[in-house]
Every structure is written in structure tokens, then in C-alpha cells.
Amino acid sequence: MAQKNRFAHHLILIVAGLIALSGCATAVAAGQQQSSPPNVVVILVDDLGYMDIGANNPDCFYETPSIDRLADSGMRFTDGYAANPVCSPTRYSLMTGKYPTRVAATNFFSGKRAGKFRPAPLNNKMPLEDTTLAQLLKANGYATFFAGKWHLGDSPEYYPQNRGFDVNIGGWSRGGPYTGKKYFAPFKNPEIKIESPAGDHLPARLARETSRFISDNQDRPFLAYLSFYSVHTPLMGRPDLVKKYNKKAATINGEEFASEEQVIGNKPRKVRILQKHAVYAAMVEAMDEAVGTVLNQLEKSGLTDNTIVVFTSDNGGLSTSEGSPTSNLPLRGGKGWVYEGGIREPWIVRYPNVTESGAVSHQPISSIDLLPTIAAAAGIEVKQPIDGIDIRPAFNNQPLGRDSLFWHYPHYSNQGGFPGGAIRRGDYKLVERYEDGRTHLFNLKKDLGEQTDLSNEMPDLVTSMRAELHAWYRSVDAKFLQPKDGLTPWNPNLNHTK
């Protein structure tokens, strides 16, 4: 009897040991899975305004179910920014983690519109010595892919395939789809090597290529960077969607336009204040469908739980020129302006097992933060100097510890915006005009539309914020307006606040 008990006891110990070993093996496997570097999908939309998606604007005229689904499954940032009110500088900041002012890449490549004064000198290439996000990830074992608009240099050595991307579909010097039949095939884009069938739609083609890359690389970490040409001009929509939105627009009444301040040549700038442009709406929905194609591919490939998805835009919605297709209200201005309408963007991050579904953050972030955040998530040390920060603490509602964000736009924009700079500190934003040095102070929490200038009421805060802005100018070697026709513009390097 005792022998049987001893045998039973040994049997129990053996079984328990096997269970423990099995548990250890499972824990090791889980640990390996947890420690594997995440895939990264970045979706960048051209000229999409903050108020152009349903997740930010419940009354949005445009329908964006795929983007809204992404927001519902991740974290939406209400105070997410682009580093500049036009495209190329923001694209530079996303790629490098740096303020574009550091390399004088302060306007779209190569915008040189004149005004009362000559614009600041412009560098129209992303310097080859800058390390890009793609180069950083590729050096650490990632497969890298780019599709869409690049606009960061005018010759092949500056194109995506020479800046860290294994694959480039459509990225070259142009800022829009201006060749062939533009948004419809034949595209005649020199970096789309295999032409689409006639009539193929560009956002759909780019989404298919992105999905194919995801499918082909599901067994290794990857970066898929989908940079839509949409919803940039030319304004061209799929006929079925244009028809749909023409019917919808016919049910909407109200004033469509108002006047922005006088800026160039003493002419008021017309600004759209009502969303009802059917062609633009068709472009937004087609882009949203393409986003859905990519999100669905992640699910189909079983990669949703190990893929960070980032969605944003490069500048505010086009509201004051070139058809003025969208309204950014309650935000003031739009693309080409340093007001909120030009720099506040849709920002959504889905980081599985980190961000909560439907989470919202009100902490200010910027396009300069993409590179350090993705690098940190992938466990990669960033050795080059950058301006951005790792925003992962915000995913857990922890403070980011950054005092201020800065903007510098020493140009006359195609959209009527004035040359100027800005600093945001807490709820306050100071705007500085480069022609004459005037400043405006706004409390964004109480006055998101930037209508009430508090400069005269809060002179000490103006002085403090202006001194910080000027110190930043000097730290990044900011360039300013140049004399013209015997007239000399204000210059903070000569008139800075100490």
C-alpha cells in the first residue's frame, strides 16, 4: 500500500513537472511573440483637414467609415499637428524627426511666391546626410515600402528607393498627379513601372500595392508607408461618388464662403465655411475606401495584433484657393496658414495592446514625433540629433514633458497665408508676423477659432512666449524675409526679444 502511494506521489510530481515545463514553454513563446518588433503602417493623406473625417467632426459632409473604424480601435489625438502649413516641410519632419527649419526646408519644393518682400532662402531637397525613418528601420531588419507622393527632392538620388525604401511605387519629385490622366490611368508616373489598366483609380492602385507588400512580408517586420496623392488638387472624383455627393449637397443650404483678413495686395481672401463640395467629397471617400483596403489586408494576414498603424495629414485642408474645396471651421484658415486650420491635423495611432479602443488624447503632438516614437516601439536607438519625442507615454495618459511646439513659415503661401511663425505653450498660442513683427495671442482652449487676440490683455505672457520663440529661431538657424524694392522687412535676429 505504501509502495502504491509512493508511486502515485511520483506520478503526481512527474505530471506537475510536465505541466510546469509546458507553462514555461508557453511563457517563453509568449515572451518571444511579445518581444518581436512590431510592423508599422503609416498612412499619410495630402491636404486632408482636421475636420474632414467623421471621427473629428460628427457633422462632416464627407463619409469616412474606414478612418473612423481605425479611430474607434486606437487613440485619436485632438491636438495633433503638422510641422508646417504646407507639404514638403512636414514630409521632411515625418521622415527625419526634425523641424524642417533646421535645413531651410520651409516651403513646398520648390515654392517661391513673391509678395511685399522676397521670401526666405529655400532648400528644396531633403539632405542626403539626414537619416530617414526607413533607413533606420531597414538597418534593423525591416522590409520597407513606399507608395504615393514623395515630393522631397527633384532627382532620383533623393527618391524613396535611395532613402531607405526597398520598394517605391509612385514617389518622385512631383507634388501632385499631374502626368497622364492624373488620378485615372494611364498615370504615366515614371515610378509606377507597370501601368494600370485604363481608368484605374490612383488611390485604389496605391492601396493594392501596399496590401500586396503586406501579404508578401507577413513573416518579417515591415514598414509600409502609404502616402496618398489624394486629396490634393487636381480636383477629380470617381463619377459614381461625385453623383452621390451632388445629391447630398443639394440638401444642404447656407453661406458657403466668407472673407479672411486682408493679406496680399489689400485683397480679402475668400475662405470656405461650409462643406458641400461634391468632387472633393468623392475624393475623400475614395481615399477612405483605400484605407479600408489596407486595414482589411492586415486583418486577412493576421497581423492586426502586431502592427502599429499611424494615420495623419501633411497640412490643413485647402479652404482659401484652388477651388477652396473644404471648410476647416471652427479652425481658422487652412493650408498655407499658420492658424490652426493650416497646421492642426487628423492624428490616429493604433498600437495593439498599448492604446485602448476609442481612446482620446488632448496632448499636443507633432509630425516631428513620428520617427522617435516608431524607433522606440521597435527597440531602436536613435543616434542622430532630432527634435521630436517618443509620445508613447501619451498612450497611457502620461504627460509628455514637452513645454512648447514651434512653427516657422517665412513665405507667402499660394493660399494667401502671410509669412509668420508660431509657438504653442499649454493652451496658449502666439502668432508672429514676419513682415512687421506684429504678434497675436490666443487661448486655444477657449478660442479654438483664434478670433480673440489677448496680446494687450496679457503682455507678460506675450513677452515670455516671444522670447522662447526667438530663442528657438536662433537654435535652428531660421531664415527670414529678404528686402525687396528698397523695402526692408522686420527681422527677429535684429529685433529679437531678450
Image (cartoon, grey):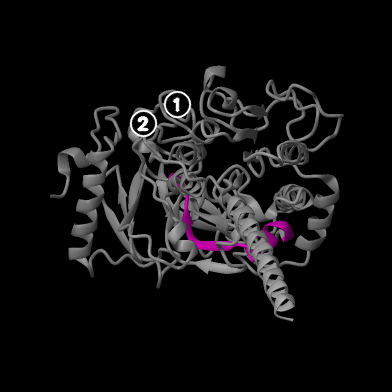
* 265 with respect to 355 (left or right): left
Label ID, residue 103: 2
Name the residue rendered at 63%, 50% in the picture: 307
Quarter of the image for residue 197 reads: top right
Name the residue rendered at 28%, 38% in the picture: 476
**Of all residues shown, which one is farthest toward the bottom?**
1
Q: Is residue 436 above or below residue 88?
A: below
| Amino acid tagged 1 | Asn
Label ID, residue 124: 1
Q: Which residues are magenta?
A: 65-85
Q: Does the stretch in magenta take in 82? A: yes
Q: Quadrant of the N terminus?
A: bottom right
Cα distance in 3D space between marks 2 and 1: 9 Å
Nearest to the observer: residue 392 or residue 258: 392
Nearest to the observer: residue 416 or residue 35: 35
Nearest to the observer: residue 106 or residue 351: 351
Badge 1 crowding class, 10 Å Cα cut-off, few under 14, some 14 to 19, many 20 or more, is many
